Image (cartoon, rainbow, N blue to C red):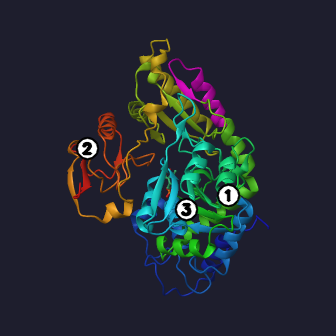
Amino acid sequence: MNQEQTPVLEMLDRFRKKNRGYFNIPAHHFETGISEKMKDVLGEKAYGIDVTETDGTDDLHCPEEAIEKAQKLAADLYGSDECWFLVNGSTCGNEAMVLSAAGPGEKIIISRDAHKSVLMGLILSGAHPIWIYPEFAERESPTAIITPGLIKKACAEHPDAKAVFLTSPSYYGICQPLKEIADICHGFGMPLLVDEAHGGHFRFHEAFPDDALSSGADVVVQSTHKTSGSLTQTSLLHLHSDLISRDRIDQSLKLVQSTSPSYVLMSSLDAARNQMAVNGRDLMDKAIKTAEYIRNGLRTAKGVYVFDEFKDRDPLRIAVSLRKTGIDGFRFQRLLFEKNITTEMADINYVLIIVSWGTTRDEADKLLEAVRRIASLRSSGKTKKEMIPSAEETYKVFRTEQRTSPREAWFSKKKKITLYEAENRIAGEMIVPYPPGIPAIYPGEVITEEIIRYLDKLRCLGASFHGVNDIDNMEIYVTEQP
Ligand SMILES: Cc1ncc(COP(=O)(O)O)c(C=O)c1O
C-alpha cells in the first residue's frame, strides 16, 4: 500500500476547508468558541480538526471511509491482518484482549507482571487468572523473564485455558522470548496475546529486538504514543491469527472505547504511522545514537551503574542507578528534578531514562552533567559489590494465593482498613506502585506480611501509588468475608 497517504488527516483538512455551516458537537465550534486561555497556550489549529462523526468524517465504530483506509495502512505497515485505532490507550486494548479471550469463570494464563489494565479487563470479563511468575535472568536485571518452560508447564497444567497473556517488552525495555513461547502456545491451540505497549517501534530498526507480531503473537497492543510519535492516549490493536474471533475483538472494543473518539487523536495515529513508514529507520537511528552517547557518558561516570547486560532489550531505555553511592532510585529522580531534568520512572534502585529521536544533544549533555554532579557528591570511588542493585529488590512480584477471581472480590462486600491490619485478608481492590503500574496486590489475592512490608518501604521512599487514597494511613479495601 502507498504509505505516503494520511487518509484521516487529509479528510479532516478537506472537511475544514469546505467551510460548511456546522451544527454539530463539539461546542467549541472550530476556532470560534475556544477558551481564550487555551488559545494563548495551544493556538487554534488543533481545534480546527476537532470534529465529530457526521457526513464525510467516517466513524471509528463503523469505519467505511478514511478511518478504515488508515487502519488498513497501519495493518499493512505492522504486518497484521487487521488493525484497530485506539483512543483510550493500550489500557482499552488490554481490556479488549482479555474480554475477547475469556469470559466469566474461564481461565486465562497471565504473567503476574501485567499492567493494571489487564486487571481491569479481568474485572470486566470475570475470567480467572492463572498466574505465572517471572524468573530473574541476571542478578541486576530490573525485569524478570518468562521462560518457555514456565509457559509449557502452565499450558500443560491448564489445557482448558483460553489464551496466554504476556507483557513484552517491560517498561525497562526488556523482552520475553516470544518466538519460542508463541510456538508452545500454538502447540496447545492457545492464542498468545501480547501487551507490547512499550515496543511499537521495534519494527523500524534492526538494532531493536524482534517485534511481537513477527515473533508469532496472535493479538498485540502497542502504545504508539509512548514510542512512535502520536498523541498521548493513542494506541494500535493488531490481530494476526485465526485463533481468536475478529468480531469478538471488534465488539469488545465497542465496550471500552469512547463513543466520541477524538479526530485529533486519530489523525495523530495516522500521521505517526506515515512518519514511521517513511522515515522510521532514520529517526530510530538518530535516537539509538543519542542513547548510545548517553549510555557511554553514564558508564564512564564515577559511582554510576547502567544496566545493559541483557541482549533482548530496547536500546532507547536506560536504567541507571546510584545505589553504589547509597542513593535510591526515588531520591535520585528527585535530585535530577531539582536540576531541571525529568525522567520516566524510578524504583528502589533505578531511574529510567527514555530517549527518542526528538532528544537533543543539548538535553543529553545536561542529563550527563547532572548525573555526574549528583554522583560525585556522594561517590566513595569504590564499587561495593553488595550495593550493586539486585533484581529481587527492584522488581517485586509476590507469590500469594488468588482466593477469588478479581471480579468476585471487586463486587463483594468490602470494608476499609489500614494495610497494617490487613495481613491474611483478601484484597478488595488493587494497590499499584505507579509507574510501572504492576499491581502489588490484586483484588481476590491474600495480603501477606511481605507485601505489606514492601509497600511500606516504597511509601517511605516516596513512591507514587494508584489505589491508595490516603498514603500516610495506607488504607485498603478488603473483602468483608475473611
Ligand atoms: C506495560 C503497559 N501496558 C499498558 C499500559 C497502558 O498504556 P496506555 O497508557 O497507552 O493506556 C502501560 C502504561 O504505562 C504499560 O506500562
Q: Nearer the viewer, residue 410 or 297?
A: 410
Question: Of helix, strand and loop, which one carries label 1?
Answer: helix
Question: Of helix, strand and loop, which one carries label 2?
Answer: loop
**Image coords of residue 75 (percent x, y):** 70, 65
Residue that mark 3 sits on: 160
The answer to whether 143 is drawn above or below residue 115 in the figure is above
**Image coords of residue 45 (percent x, y):** 55, 67
Q: Which residues are magenta?
A: 290-307
Residue that mark 2 sits on: 423
Q: Tag 1: residue type?
A: His
Lateral position of residue 111 relative to residue 338, left or right:
right
Which disc is residue 186 wearing?
A: 1
Gap between marks 3 and 2 measured at Cα? 33 Å
388 part of magenta stretch: no
Q: Tag 3: residue type?
A: Asp
The answer to the question of whether label 3 and label 1 lie on touching residues, with beta carbons closer than 8 A, is no
